[in-house]
Image (spheres, rainbow, N blue to C red):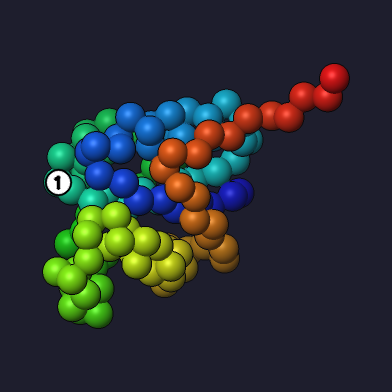
Amino acid sequence: MLNFCTLFNSNYLARGLALYRSLLQNCDSFHLYVFAFDDACYDYLRAGNFEHITPISLAAFESPELLQVKASRTMAEYCWTCTPSTILYCLQNFPIEGCTYIDADMLFTVARRF
């Protein structure tokens, strides 16, 4: 099984769901850990009961170190700051051996030979 993590807020929710659908279409066995960067996003993902998604709230994820720098960063900068911590969080909190970070606006597709 492949384990992926990503982060986004409700403004990127449509892109994150497109990423998820592309994984469903192109990956036989995967799990996606989504760090929801606002309550609306987290609530939507929880209510959606997506089979291969584990939503993670900011309250569960943010460490004292991240919170210390949060106020000095724009939202985009804070997301970039949090990226490596998402992988570490997954490895420390879930029974997985590896995890790959992917941007929420990526799409997976099968390459075709012509």
Which residue is labeled 1 in the image? Answer: 39
> Image check: 91 left or right of 111?
left
Residue drawn where x is 24% and y is 37% of the image: 11
Residue drawn where x is 53% and y is 59% of the image: 99
Residue drawn where x is 22% and y is 38% of the image: 10
User: Where 72 sits versus 99, above or below?
Assistant: below
User: Where 98 sits versus 32, above or below?
Assistant: below
Q: Residue furthest top?
A: 114
Query: Which of 62/90 is in front?
Result: 62
> Image check: 78 left or right of 31?
left
Coordinates of residue 46 in the picture (x, y in percent) = 24, 40
> Image check: 91 left or right of 72?
right
Coordinates of residue 50 in the picture (x, y in percent) = 36, 34
Coordinates of residue 40 in the picture (x, y in percent) = 15, 40
User: Where 40 sits versus 91, above or below?
Assistant: above
User: Where 80 sits versus 26, above or below?
Assistant: below
Q: Locate the C terminus by quadrant.
A: top right
Q: Is residue 93 visible?
A: no
Residue drawn where x is 37% and y is 61% of the image: 80
Amino acid at the residue labelled 1? Asp
> Image check: 55 left or right of 23?
left
Coordinates of residue 81 in the picture (x, y in percent) = 34, 67
Q: Residue furthest right?
A: 114
- Mark 1 element type: helix
Q: Is residue 79 visible?
A: yes
The quadrant in which residue 47 appears is: top left
Classify 10 Å Cα crowding around label 1: few (below 14), some (14-19), many (20 and above).
some
Counting labels gives: 1
